[in-house]
Amino acid sequence: MKKKWSLNEKYTELQDLYSTYQICPLSVTLNAIGGKWKPAVYRVISLGVHRFGEMHHALEGISKRMLTRYLREMEKDGIIHREVFPVVPPKVEYSLTDFGKTLKPVFAAIEKWGLEHGDKTDTTPDE
Amino acid sequence: MKKKWSLNEKYTELQDLYSTYQICPLSVTLNAIGGKWKPAVYRVISLGVHRFGEMHHALEGISKRMLTRYLREMEKDGIIHREVFPVVPPKVEYSLTDFGKTLKPVFAAIEKWGLEHGDKTDTTPDE
DNA sequence: GCTCATAGTGACATAAATGTTACTCTTGTT
DNA sequence: AACAAGAGTAACATTTATGTCACTATGAGC
């Protein structure tokens, strides 16, 4: 089959990149922190809000269903720890794992850019 | 109305955070880099793939519609520059603006974490 | 024996993001 | 005259992400 595309050397470099890592490292991280509420959940937990109800209240607007989903997913990823106290009414506490704490620099970089450049980006919704 | 919730001091700190910045700096950045293909588009451009067709080919799987959408959005955000050459057939080149380059450290942090911890996160899809 | 609190779950509905396919426009070439 | 190339666009279809609302479980206190 004839090669239709002759891309420059940079593109070769790109292909190498993709073949070296089967899974794109960007996606790995973005999967771990992506989703409408995950960054907020992360921040709230790292600020010391631990119980389900507190978090639900702190994250104004999130539904219990979504909060549960995100917490479960982050737990599955090893980012947070879920501890159930066998009492009535139920009590459950969430906390960052050591692994979860390794995400701090990532969020720091994200937050820093937002603080420095937030005024320059367009916030008007697309029509 | 009676106060039902007595959250700890950390929560107060959180509220302060939210009221200080009307727009959450995390969202600012995540809006700029979020979306299924934006990080990939960014990387491809920064590696030197400039023309629409090349990018469409390099980003295997993206539809022209979505590529166009993302490019327009990133242009609107000032991250990339779009230059149209008045020739037939059309030629358009995209490049990172100086502002766009300020995102490098953000992507670097994201990529670094992915490289270091990619093997530890769960990649099995939810059932 | 009724009510409250907490941390959910389940069924369903809606919104947002992404994909598909066909079509446009303009000139140089066959 | 028909065709090709490059960079899209338009209308529509589908998938994925979120939201809503009602409901569960259990023991304590009234």
Image (tube, coloured by chain):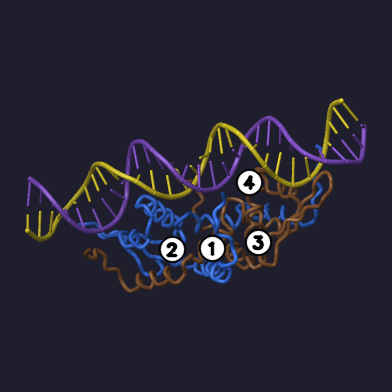
Chain colours: A blue, B brown, C purple, D yellow
- Looking at the rendering, in which quadrant would you find the N terminus of chain B? bottom left
What is the x, y in percent for residue C4?
A: 17, 56
CA distance separating discs 4 and 2: 30 Å
- For label 1, the crowd category at 10 Å Cα-Cα, with few meaning under 14, some 14 to 19 and many 20 or more, is many
Label 4 sits on a secondary structure element that is helix
Residue B19 lies, in percent from the top left, at: 42, 69
Location of residue B27 in the rendering, given as x and y in whole percent from the top left corner? 51, 61
Can you identify the residue that label 3 sits on?
Answer: B78
Q: Badge 2 is on which residue?
A: A42
Q: In the rendered view, does C11 fall on the left or right side of B99?
A: left
Give the crowd class for mark 3: few <14, some 14-19, many >=20 residues within 10 Å.
some
Q: Which residue has dot 4 on it? A: B66
Residue type beneath disc 1: Val
Q: Of A98 and A59, which appears nearest the observer? A: A59
Residue drawn where x is 24% and y is 63% of the image: B4
The kind of secondary structure element at disc 3 is loop
Q: Where does label 1 land, which residue?
A: B28
**Gap in Å between the C-alphas at discs 3 and 4?**
18 Å
Against B16, residue A41 (above or below) is above
Residue at 59%, 63% (x, y): give it. A121
State which tag comes first along the sequence, 4 or 1. 1
SS of the residue under disc 1: helix
